[in-house]
Image (cartoon, rainbow, N blue to C red):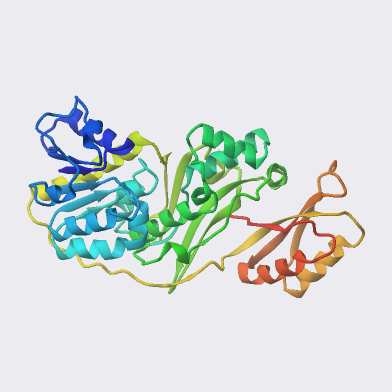
């Protein structure tokens, strides 16, 4: 096998392979920029170090491990390896989320394998489980906490009641968040992972950009106070549900029961729940990032591919992927938190707008002790579709007492 990319994960993969020494997997090549600075004394002397990917293509390596990330040049390299009949193992979520179906078909056509178990949830073996362990079921729903950065930030706001900005700074200081954490905070990372889960578990083609993503930036400590009154907490939840020819999919913050599996997940852990027609619900929990957990997932994929190679050329299995309509129009109860300049008639004005759109109020919550010139309070709604709620929120935005846009969060069971 050849290792392309010798960064944090690549080094850990190489270490595991060198320390295992079981004879099944033999590292022959390492490809990386500036290899002279990357060389390590613990790597066997017969391993070829190179900066030229074409040396990998022309080598006797049967498996290529792509760990450079991103789309360029990773996409070209993975395609070239598959066309050359070499199986590929990758942790590249951007590549699989965008081109996974096409690359799987390319692997099939060339009698090789493409495995990507490390592209979602790091060391949590959810993707291998979806592709093999649960392939006998007919899954219709997948939901999860897929981004450890967001989960760390939200759980810190919950436990310490600190501002969002302070929780973000903590996450950056601990290395859980990049200097520019937009991809995490605004849902881009999680929706790419959700697209991969839908591909592996629901057998559907879905582009990440077709999944609506809502940011966690507007969640405040006061929202956790109100959520606690409702027996809930707040997490970034990625969810998808296949109903006939429509795939409902969304990523964003939502209220979850504090006693639920999602409510109990703290700090930077990941959790994935699946729902199947025959097997019911399954849960997968663990560290979603980091060199060691991700490297374990990569090596597990390597062993799976190597075992297949040991029994001869695999028989191509035709891919049967659906292309459903994608919608974010879930039906749920809703949490609406407003900040207003207090005056008579606020509830009446809001109730009139909600009533016009066929929306029923379930409860009104107002904690004492806040400045009347910037008063936060909450209305919860009985179950309704997102498409019913949005026009009402637009009308609320221009009310004279509204100081900022209403925060709307689905309340998930």
Q: Quick check: can you spot residue 16?
A: no
Camera-side residue of 228 and 206: 206
Residue nearer the viewer, 234 or 282: 234
Q: Is residue 265 visible?
A: yes
Compare residues 20 and 78 and report the one nearer the observer.
78
Q: In the image, residue 367 lies at what x, y percent?
A: 81, 45
- Give residue 396's quadrant in the image: bottom right
Image spot of residue 122 (x, y percent): 37, 42
Q: Locate residue 376 relative to residue 106 in the image: left or right.
A: right
Q: Is the N terminus in the top left, top right, bottom left or bottom right quadrant? A: top left
Question: Which residue is at a point 12% across and 48% down the rendered structure image?
Answer: 55
The quadrant of the rendering that contains the C terminus is bottom right
Q: Is residue 313 left or right of residue 335?
A: left
Q: Is residue 44 above or below residue 138?
A: above
**Side of 145 relative to 316 (left or right):** right
Quarter of the image holding residue 196?
bottom left
Q: Residue furthest top?
A: 41
Q: Residue at x 46, y 52 (%)?
A: 189
Question: Residue 304: x and y, percent?
Answer: 20, 46
Q: Could you tell whether 102 is left or right of 156 in the image? A: left
Quadrant assignment, res 17: top left
Total marks placed: 0
Foreground of the two, 222 or 364: 222
Which residue shows up at 71% across the image and 68% down it?
Answer: 394
Determine the residue located farthest toward the right in the rendered image.
Answer: 344
- The residue positioned 62% from the left and 67% from the top of the image is 386
């Amino acid at each position: 096998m050849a290792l392309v990319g010798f960064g944090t994960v690549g080094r850990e993969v190489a270490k595991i392979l060198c320390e295992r020494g079981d004879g099944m997997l033999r590292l022959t090549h390492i490809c990386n920029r500036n290899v002279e600075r990357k060389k390590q004394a613990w790597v066997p002397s017969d391993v070829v170090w190179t900066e030229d990917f074409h040396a990998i293509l022309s080598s006797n390596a049967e498996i290529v491990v792509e760990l450079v990330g991103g789309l360029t040049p990773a996409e070209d390299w993975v395609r070239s390896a598959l066309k050359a009949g070499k199986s590929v193992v990758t942790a590249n979520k951007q590549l699989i989320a965008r081109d996974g179906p096409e690359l799987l078909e390319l692997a099939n056509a060339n009698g090789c394998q493409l495995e990507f178990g490390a592209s979602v949830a790091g060391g949590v073996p959810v993707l291998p489980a979806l592709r093999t362990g649960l392939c006998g079921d007919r899954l219709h729903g997948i939901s999860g906490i897929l981004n450890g950065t967001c989960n760390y930030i939200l759980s810190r706001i919950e436990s310490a009641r600190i501002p969002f900005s302070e929780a973000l700074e903590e996450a950056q200081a601990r290395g859980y968040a990049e200097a520019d954490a937009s991809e995490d905070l605004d849902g881009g990372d999680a929706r790419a992972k959700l697209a991969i889960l839908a591909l592996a578990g629901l057998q559907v083609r879905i582009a990440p950009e077709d999944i609506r993503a809502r940011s966690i930036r507007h969640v405040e400590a006061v929202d956790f106070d109100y959520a606690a009154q409702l027996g809930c907490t707040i997490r970034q939840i990625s969810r998808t549900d296949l109903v006939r020819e429509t795939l409902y999919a969304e990523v964003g913050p939502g209220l979850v029961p504090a006693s639920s599996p999602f409510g109990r997940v703290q700090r930077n852990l990941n959790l994935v729940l699946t729902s199947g027609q025959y097997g019911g619900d399954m849960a997968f929990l663990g560290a979603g990032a980091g060199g060691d957990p991700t490297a374990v997932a990569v090596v597990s994929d390597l062993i799976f591919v190597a075992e297949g190679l040991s029994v001869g050329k695999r028989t191509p299995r035709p891919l049967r992927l659906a292309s459903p309509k994608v919608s974010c129009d879930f039906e749920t109860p809703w949490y609406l938190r407003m900040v207003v300049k207090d005056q008579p008639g606020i509830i009446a004005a809001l109730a009139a707008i909600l009533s016009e759109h066929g929306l029923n109020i379930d409860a009104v919550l107002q904690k004492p002790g806040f400045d009347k010139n910037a008063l936060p309070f909450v209305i919860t709604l009985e179950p309704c579709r997102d498409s019913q709620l949005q026009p009402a929120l637009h009308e609320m935005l221009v009310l004279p007492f509204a100081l900022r846009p209403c925060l709307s969060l689905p309340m998930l069971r």
